[in-house]
């Protein structure tokens, strides 16, 4: 187990700068999720930590030792690759046990440990198969097995569940969580799926274009997103953004929508304005009476039932908002409705240029 | 779709059936068009069939027939005379036959194995350690001997190996005078001139060297293609699994190119067992050189057919050689075929 620290880490491929001055500390035993859009440098970061890629500048520190110069073998890090990278000429069992074999563990013990790992991942029936005879999800589990069979200082996961179906994915998620609670190995987990990040991680790192946008616990990110990118990335369905103008009257600050609706907001936002973006989470918007507090008028564009809740698309001041309606109200298309939101649930961001 | 109450009785209750009650008509083609359809594919492959028949199938059958005849080709077809198994008996009785098979096997092994032992690491280094432009340059250079006429190469080596004026002997003498080398090359001076192609001990190694030199580049190309198919991810995974450079080569790269190795070895076996030009030129076409040390099976076959004009016996020998190659290849397939053909992936 190790504490992993990245200090002013940058990486360029030729003229293309992929990672910009990253600083991140992953405490010993911590589970950190790394999320961000495709191409933002998540895999590159993991490869640098694993020692497969050299940093252009900056330091990788493990337990207070700078490990920039060390080979992957010396760093003792296990990694699950996005592309699985299973060895086609080895059976599932050989794939899982390969690391142990290379480290000189006795044959019988390799066998026992590989089988135990396979058992955990539900691969027992497939031990004698070659990777080409497995489904995508099974391959992904073998790739997981190759990592968990070891006792590394840190785990790096590169989207390990992206190819599984919803049910298996949530099962594996639980399995990973259980595993981490048991062995408490420092883990860095890359994912596109924010639910995965929120449910698994102690802290989440949001990366965009090679720059860290925010680091925080899942609830911090949800409650206090640092910018509109983080706000839009965390939460499902995604946050709604509405153009507004900040107006001050007396000591009260209002956000005025294009249709003239004025919503009182915290005065802490006063100096962001005048042109701003309001961030309204779909689950914080409610259908309301016309005379309710903060009522916003709109018309129903679309109603999407998902079973437990309905997702409504409501047109407000020329923009379309998503609303999660847990009252399952039956609404006609083009019906006029009103939405309300508590003032302290309104996020305000500077307007993007 | 729902079943209407008017549906005729007796229909399956499990699903809608909409078959009309009129008898079904088969739509098809007129007989002439069916003929054209059947013949077209044959027309397209006929060039191959014709060439194959004339140049492969016919000679094959004819040589089988010929191996039971006594025939001097100069005297015309009418001089053919049926002799039963005599040709085979004669061939198997001839000590030169056995000598040539022994020489063939010796040359196949001694000139075959080093080709691969050199080509595999060279190809690996070219693929993993240098830029692709450099790799292509070297691969092309190594490939040049393969596309050069064997006769030209053999002639050049013939002069290199020459006893009195050959470069090889001159170099050996020069090197043997260098400080360090002189201690263990002291014998060179006395042994001069070394007759590389005119002593029964040295002919085969000399031939083998030429063959290795000529074909290693070809194998480098095959193995390079093989190593290029190994995805970089696998090496990354192996590094994370703790492999050093040698372990990556041994555990990942080498098993991954097994199908290529199998292919290359098969070609080497078949090619080496038919070796003819190199020994023929290097022994000046002189009955396999001193003591027939350079006489290979194909060479012997040539002597019997074209020097001694015994076509029937030559045909019999060619069938014996065929059997020999078939058995060796079959053994190779038996032991390496499953993994080599990728049947284990
Ligand atoms: N070897 C390389 N040479 C040049 N550019 C590269 C190389 N590897 C990655 N890149 C670039 O670096 C950027 C980050 O790539 P990376 O694979 O880290 O993205 P990612 O965040 O993992 O994306 P995804 O979620 O799609 O896997 C991309 O723009 C990619 O094109
Ligand atoms: Mg990636």
Image (spheres, grey):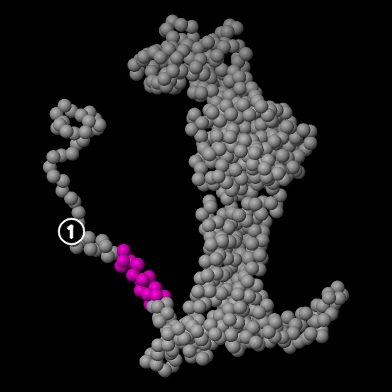
- To which chain does the residue with label 1 belong? B
Q: Is residue A258 left or right of residue B163?
A: left
Return the residue nearer the eye: B273 or A308.
Answer: B273
Which quarter of the rendered picture does the N terminus of chain A lie within?
top right
Return the residue nearer the eye: B261 or B143.
Answer: B261
Residue highlighted by disc 1: B30
Which quarter of the rendered picture does the C terminus of chain A lie within?
top right
Q: Residue at x 52, y 84 (%)?
A: B91
Instruction: Indicate the quadrant where residue A151 lies.
Output: top right
- Residue B298, horizontal then vertical, whole percent: 54, 80
Q: Is residue B78 left or right of residue B145?
A: left
- Residue B294, horizontal then vertical, whole percent: 62, 82
Q: Residue at x 38, y 70 (%)?
A: B48
Q: Which residues are magenta?
A: B41-57
- Residue B338, horizontal then vertical, whole percent: 53, 57
Return the residue nearer the eye: A142 or B133.
Answer: A142
Q: Is residue A254 above or below residue A185?
A: above
Magenta span: predominant SS is helix
* Residue B44 sits inside the magenta stretch: yes
- Residue A240, horizontal then vertical, whole percent: 50, 21
């Amino acid at each position: 187990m190790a504490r992993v620290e990245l200090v002013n880490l940058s990486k360029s491929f030729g003229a293309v700068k992929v990672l910009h001055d990253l600083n991140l500390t992953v405490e010993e035993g911590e589970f950190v999720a790394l999320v961000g859009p495709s191409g933002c440098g998540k895999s590159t970061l993991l490869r640098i930590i694993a020692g497969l890629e050299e940093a252009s500048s900056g330091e990788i520190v493990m337990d207070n030792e700078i490990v920039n110069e060390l080979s992957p073998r010396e760093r003792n890090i296990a990694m699950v690759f996005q592309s699985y990278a299973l060895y086609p000429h080895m059976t599932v069992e050989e794939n899982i046990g390969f690391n142990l074999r290379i480290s000189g563990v006795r044959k019988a013990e390799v066998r026992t440990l590989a089988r135990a790992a396979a058992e955990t991942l539900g691969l027992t029936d497939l031990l004698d198969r070659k990777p080409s005879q497995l489904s995508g999800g099974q391959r992904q589990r073998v790739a997981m097995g190759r990592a968990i069979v070891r006792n590394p200082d840190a785990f790096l996961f590169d989207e390990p569940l992206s190819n599984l179906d919803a049910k298996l994915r949530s099962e594996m998620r639980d399995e990973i969580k259980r595993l981490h609670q048991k062995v408490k190995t420092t883990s860095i987990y890359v994912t596109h799926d924010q639910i995965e990040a929120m449910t698994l991680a102690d802290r989440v790192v949001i990366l965009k274009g090679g720059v860290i946008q925010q680091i925080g616990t899942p609830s911090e990110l949800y409650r206090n997103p640092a910018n509109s990118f983080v706000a839009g990335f965390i939460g499902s369905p995604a946050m709604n953004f509405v153009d507004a103008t900040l107006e001050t009257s007396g000591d009260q600050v209002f956000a005025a929508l294009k249709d003239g609706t004025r919503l009182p907001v915290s005065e802490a936002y006063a100096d962001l304005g005048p042109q701003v973006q309001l961030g309204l989470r779909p689950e914080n918007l409610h259908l309301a009476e016309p005379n309710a507090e903060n009522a916003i008028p709109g018309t129903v564009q679309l109603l999407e039932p998902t079973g437990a809740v309905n997702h409504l698309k409501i047109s407000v001041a020329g923009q379309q908002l998503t609303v999660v309606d847990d009252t399952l109200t039956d609404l006609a298309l083009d019906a006029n409705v009103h939405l309300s939101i508590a003032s302290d649930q309104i996020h305000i961001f500077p307007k993007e240029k | 779709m729902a079943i209407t109450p008017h549906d005729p009785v007796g229909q399956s209750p499990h699903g809608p059936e909409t078959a009309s009650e009129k008898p079904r008509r088969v739509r098809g083609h007129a007989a002439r068009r069916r003929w054209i359809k059947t013949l077209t594919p044959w027309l397209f492959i006929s060039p191959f069939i014709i060439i194959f028949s004339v140049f492969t199938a016919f000679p094959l059958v004819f040589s089988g027939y010929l191996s039971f005849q006594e025939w001097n080709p100069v005297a015309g077809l009418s001089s053919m005379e049926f002799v039963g198994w005599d040709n085979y008996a004669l061939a198997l009785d001839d000590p030169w036959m056995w000598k040539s098979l022994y020489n063939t096997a010796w040359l196949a092994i001694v000139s075959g194995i080093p080709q691969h032992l050199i080509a595999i690491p060279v190809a690996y280094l070219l693929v993993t350690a240098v830029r692709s432009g450099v790799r292509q340059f070297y691969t092309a250079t190594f490939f040049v001997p393969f596309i050069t006429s064997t006769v030209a190469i053999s002639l050049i080596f013939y002069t290199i190996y020459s006893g009195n004026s050959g470069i090889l002997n001159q170099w050996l003498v020069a090197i043997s005078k260098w400080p360090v080398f002189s201690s263990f090359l002291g014998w060179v001076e006395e042994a001069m001139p070394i007759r590389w192609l005119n002593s029964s001990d040295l002919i085969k190694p000399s031939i083998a060297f030429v063959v290795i030199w000529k074909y290693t580049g070809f194998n480098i190309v095959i193995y390079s293609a093989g190593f290029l198919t190994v995805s970089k991810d696998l090496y990354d995974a192996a590094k994370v699994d703790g492999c050093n450079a040698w372990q990556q080569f041994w555990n990942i790269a080498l098993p991954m190119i097994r199908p290529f190795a199998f292919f290359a070895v098969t070609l080497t076996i078949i090619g080496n067992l038919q070796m003819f030009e190199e020994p023929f030129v290097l022994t000046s076409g002189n009955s396999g050189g001193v003591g027939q040390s350079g006489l290979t099976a194909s060479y012997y076959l040539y002597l019997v057919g074209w020097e001694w004009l015994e076509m029937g016996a030559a045909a019999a020998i060619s069938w014996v050689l065929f059997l020999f190659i078939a058995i060796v290849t079959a053994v190779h397939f038996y032991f390496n075929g499953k993994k080599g053909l990728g049947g284990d992936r």
